[in-house]
Amino acid sequence: MLSKSIKKLVEYGVETGLTPECERIYTTNLLLELFKEDEYEDVSIEGEELNLEEILKELLDEACARGIIEDSIVYRDLFDTKMMNCLVPRPAQVQETFAKKYEVSPKEATDYYYKLSQDSDYIRRYRVCKDRKWKERKMGSIRFSERLIKLGYKESVVERVRTCGDVLKFVKDPVQGLKLYQAYFCKNKLCPMCNWRRSMKYSWQIKQILDKALEQYPKARFLFLTLTPTYFKGSENYISQADWTEMWEESAKLDYTPVVNIKAVKEKVAREDLHDDFSEDGIMKAVLETAKYPVKPFEIERDKHGKVIERSEEKLTQITGELLDGLYKKRQLGFGGLLKELRKELHLDDIENGDLVNTSDEKTEPTAGEQIVAYWNYARGNYFIKQ
């Protein structure tokens, strides 16, 4: 119901301080005008949770249903900016408030502006949370440590994994939000937290390398090679390559003939205005997608229909043991040929055992802004912030 959603958004504005109480009716009318709506029903929202992401989604869905905007990320983002503009103070008011606070304390002024940026949805906090999922990955590391106990690993190994990511130190950036600058990571090959960081680092590095490779060989094509033991039967999904099979069998010292899959990495269809944008829609995006495979978690696997494969804890523990045995003293990531040469030329850090805090070349210094520390609370199963 449009009236209810608008009332919740206005209430959110008043509660966060974006909208003065005396401008409640004025702000409501601005939002009604955006939706080309003449009628408004003053419904009760008592007991309703004022979750900005959900409120905006309700209103954006309504705008799409009314044909006011197209249902795409770009148009939805533009329209929710228009809606939030109905709530926020004028730029001159923001500048005046910032200047007054700055005279008292620069920190107070930047805190004011940072909060305003978050409350006004300029910094989309809920997207940052979705992208990071620190809590879920930390819980995955704890489950992994419990399996290590069952497998009889030394207490020191278990403790390193269990305490992985216990304390996270961030710097508050006015535009990009929180940026990690210090943390302890265990670097175990199967740790969910560490593998997520490796995935970020691998994706960034492979993009630097491929950018360089495409400069030298603009018409290059990429191949995605899958070398499996006995997980798949039949060859209907594979292009059989006898030479690849023979080489893999010899290099892996196998006593059976493995299944080998090799195919070209295909470019996804791009919008007409983005045909040359390799970072988003071209062949680069497809190659970067394949880069996730070496560090992909095994806890959540899906079948060919997309359904999650349910496994017992006993089975997951067994798989953990087998993988750890198989990966012992083995590298999971490697570069060869031209890519190896370019990686050396770019002086890139080791992905598996190197720095997992700074996953790109942009290093964050603790002096760059206000520091925020997140501590893992084992009793409550979540991170809690200490500013």
Image (spheres, rainbow, N blue to C red):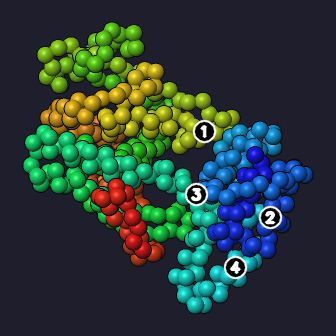
Mark 4 = which residue? Answer: 95
Residue 113, quarter of the rendered image: bottom right
How far apart marks 2 and 1 lie (CA) works out to: 42 Å
Q: Position of residue 56 (x, y in %)?
A: 67, 51
Circle 1 Cα neighbour tier, 10 Å, few/some/many (<14 / 14–19 / ≥20): few
Q: Is residue 186 above or below residue 73?
A: below
How far apart marks 1 and 4 lie (CA) works out to: 40 Å
Mark 1 = which residue? Answer: 276
Circles 3 and 2, Cβ within 8 Å, touching? The answer is no
How far apart marks 4 and 3 lie (CA) works out to: 22 Å
Q: Which numbered disc flags the more N-terminal residue, 3 or 2?
A: 2
For the residues carrying marks 4 and 2, which lies nearer the camera in this image?
2
Q: Say which amino acid is labelled 3.
A: Arg
Mark 2 = which residue? Answer: 27
Circles 4 and 3, Cβ within 8 Å, touching? The answer is no
Circles 2 and 1, Cβ within 8 Å, touching? The answer is no
Instruction: Decide which of 91, 218 is in the foreground and name it.
Output: 91
Q: Say which amino acid is labelled 2.
A: Thr
In the visual, does 258 lie left or right of 290? Answer: left
Circle 3 Cα neighbour tier, 10 Å, few/some/many (<14 / 14–19 / ≥20): some
Any part of residue 319 in sight = no
How far apart marks 4 and 2 lie (CA) works out to: 21 Å
Mark 3 = which residue? Answer: 124
Q: Position of residue 45 (x, y in %)?
A: 70, 56
Q: Position of residue 175 (x, y in %)?
A: 56, 65
In the visual, does 160 lie left or right of 277? Answer: left
Q: Which numbered disc flags the more N-terminal residue, 4 or 3?
A: 4
Q: Residue furthest right?
A: 38
